[in-house]
Image (cartoon, helix red, strand yellow):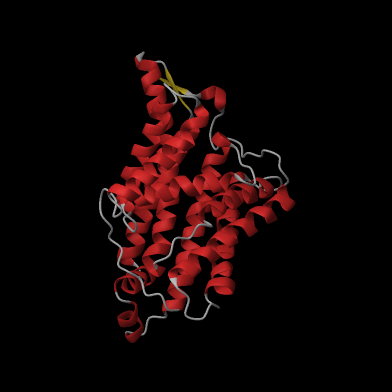
Amino acid sequence: MPLSLILQYLFSGITAGAIYAVIAIGFNIVYNTTGIINFAQGEFVMLGGMIAISLGGFMPLPVAVAGAVAITALVGGLLEFVFIRRMKNPTVIQMIIVTIGLSILIREAALHVWDEKVHSLPYFTGNEISSLRIFGACLSPQVLWVLGTCAAVVAGLSLFFTHTAAGRAMRACSADRIGAMLCGINARTMVTLSFMISAAIGALAGCVISPITSTTYDCGTSLAVKGFTVAIIGGLGNSAGAVVAGLLLGIVEAFCISFMPMSYRDVVVIAILLAALSLKPSGLFGSSASHALKEF
């Protein structure tokens, strides 16, 4: 295989892996605070891209992206407040089923608002023609935005959880919910905040990938499966593990195209997920998450 082709697959895999990692981090934030898997995370990615595309029709791109992230964060908080918080002594399984129902609800609403057409944002910088050439392989300028977003999310969350009162409160709820409540922390508010942050992260991912992959009303489902796979491989609750696992999965997925049809990429992802659940459910890097309490 020529070096240029190897590099092309590698760049493609790293780009996809960074996207999966950001989505997995959104899964981890909710899991760390509540102990549940929010299967509506993929729909937040779709919403971010779709809302930014709509806003971009009458405002500058940076403002449209910021507006999409803010609106999606509010949607995430509203869904938690209306559907999750109102449940009386729910089990984790019940809450997971609710998030699956919410993902279907959001997807069908998006179908009626934006139809079945393929939409996309313009490139943040440059265009498809202005790709960088590295040893014969093409690297789109938008890829740099994807990688930069992944790095910024990881660094920003690290600072948030370490140096802010809200971040430390969320960590306290993750470690010992009852103890945090006895210290005066409003656990319900922290749960809502976790949904808002995960929704905002998903929306930002949806915006930066839209110029590369385009956006449709049903694109969130596939991204949610891959993000969940990365979260499992990296260890639920372990954001650093999610980044490594995301890059690994993206590279494996990219190189699979060299010896099998592209339509089999999802089969490879599902096979990896099943293998991870069977052989090492705690993930390659273990889990830093504590078992959240089931009561709200």
Give the vertical position of 14 relative to 172 (above or below): above
Question: Residue 63: in sight, yes or no?
Answer: no
| Residue extending furthest toward the front | 278
In which quadrant of the rendered image does the N terminus lie? top left
Give the vertical position of 178 relative to 139 (above or below): below
Image location of residue 3, percent across then percent down? 34, 16
**Residue 138 quadrant:** top left
Image location of residue 164, percent across then percent down? 35, 68
Give the vertical position of 128 relative to 291 (above or below): above
| Residue extending furthest toward the left | 285
| Relative depth, front residue between 191 and 104 | 104
In which quadrant of the rendered image does the C terminus lie? bottom left
Residue drawn 30% across and 64% down? 162
Left or right: where 159 falls relative to 212:
left
Query: So how many labels did they put on this image?
Result: 0
Image location of residue 212, percent across then percent down? 54, 34
Left or right: where 278 falls relative to 63:
left
Residue drawn 45% across and 73% down? 91
Residue drawn 53% across and 77% down? 87
Left or right: where 9 falls relative to 172:
right
Residue drawn 42% across and 29% down? 254
Question: Residue 104: in sight, yes or no?
Answer: yes
Left or right: where 37 falls relative to 1:
right
**Residue 186 quadrant:** bottom left
Image location of residue 130, percent across then percent down? 52, 24
